[in-house]
Amino acid sequence: PAPANFELLAKNISENKLSNVESYPFAVGSSPGVAAISLSKTNSGDHRLQDISNREQVVVSVTSIDSFISEGHETPDAIIMDVQGAELDVLLGAPNFLSNANSLVLFSEFWPGGLNERNPNGARNLLETIARTGMSISIIDEISSALKPASTESLMNSVIDDSEVNLLCIRQL
């Protein structure tokens, strides 16, 4: 993540004495390496792992979920991601994890505008990647406090361009 966001996360973990939380100062993407994060001046939740010419950039280390696990880290039971259009990249870096994890919970923002800006047809590809793993997809409806079952087609038809929804995807074996 952006260095200032990581410092805030580390401070929050420390102040709340969270012994079951580990944090790492790198971004997650499709493969290990380095990349530039374009920083938003007005929204610390809108830093993006892509080149945006009118934004300050910071170079960060990047890993993939499969690489992280292969380095000896525990296999996660859940993934929570809101990575400003890079959600497909995160899943593309996790083919072994997605095929080998018995049960899996994935919370993800679904923002077609950001996904398609980063990858041609990125929104559809993200949903199809999730569906191929055998996970069920539900929209988290914050207004009614309910889960609403969804499919690739229903999401592609109802969540357009710059609108977004939060998804809960579950595979139980």
Image (cartoon, helix red, strand yellow):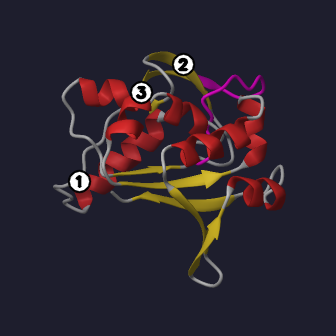
Q: Nearer the viewer, mark 3 or mark 1?
A: 3
Main structural element of the magenta stretch: helix, strand or loop?
A: loop
Query: Residue 9, how many percent across, how many down?
Result: 37, 49
Residue closest to the eye, 21 or 92: 92
Residue closest to the eye, 80 or 55: 80
Q: Nearer the viewer, mark 1 or mark 2?
A: 2
Indicate the quadrant where residue 17 lies: bottom left
Query: Residue 19, how many percent across, how many down?
Result: 16, 55
What is the count of numbered marks?
Answer: 3
Task: Give the structural element (helix, strand or loop) at label 3.
Answer: loop
Q: Is residue 114 toward the left or the right of residue 82 in the image?
A: right
Question: What's under tag 1, amino acid-wise?
Answer: Ser
Q: Which residue is at a point 63% across and 34% down the rendered structure image?
A: 48
**Residue occupied by mark 3:** 64
**Residue occupied by mark 2:** 35
Residue span colored magenta: 45-57
Instruction: Tell me, yes or no, if residue 26 can be seen here.
Output: no
Measured in 3D between alpha carbons, the distance from the residue under mark 1 to the one under mark 2, in whole angstroms, is: 28 Å
Question: What's under tag 3, amino acid-wise?
Answer: Ser
Residue lying at the far bottom of the rendered structure:
144
* Residue 94 position (above or below residue 80): above
**Residue occupied by mark 1:** 14
Residues at badges 3 and 1 in contact (C-beta under 8 Å)? no
Question: What's under tag 2, amino acid-wise?
Answer: Ala
Q: Which residue is at a point 57% across and 82% down the rendered structure image?
A: 145
Measured in 3D between alpha carbons, the distance from the residue under mark 3 to the one under mark 2, in whole angstroms, is: 13 Å
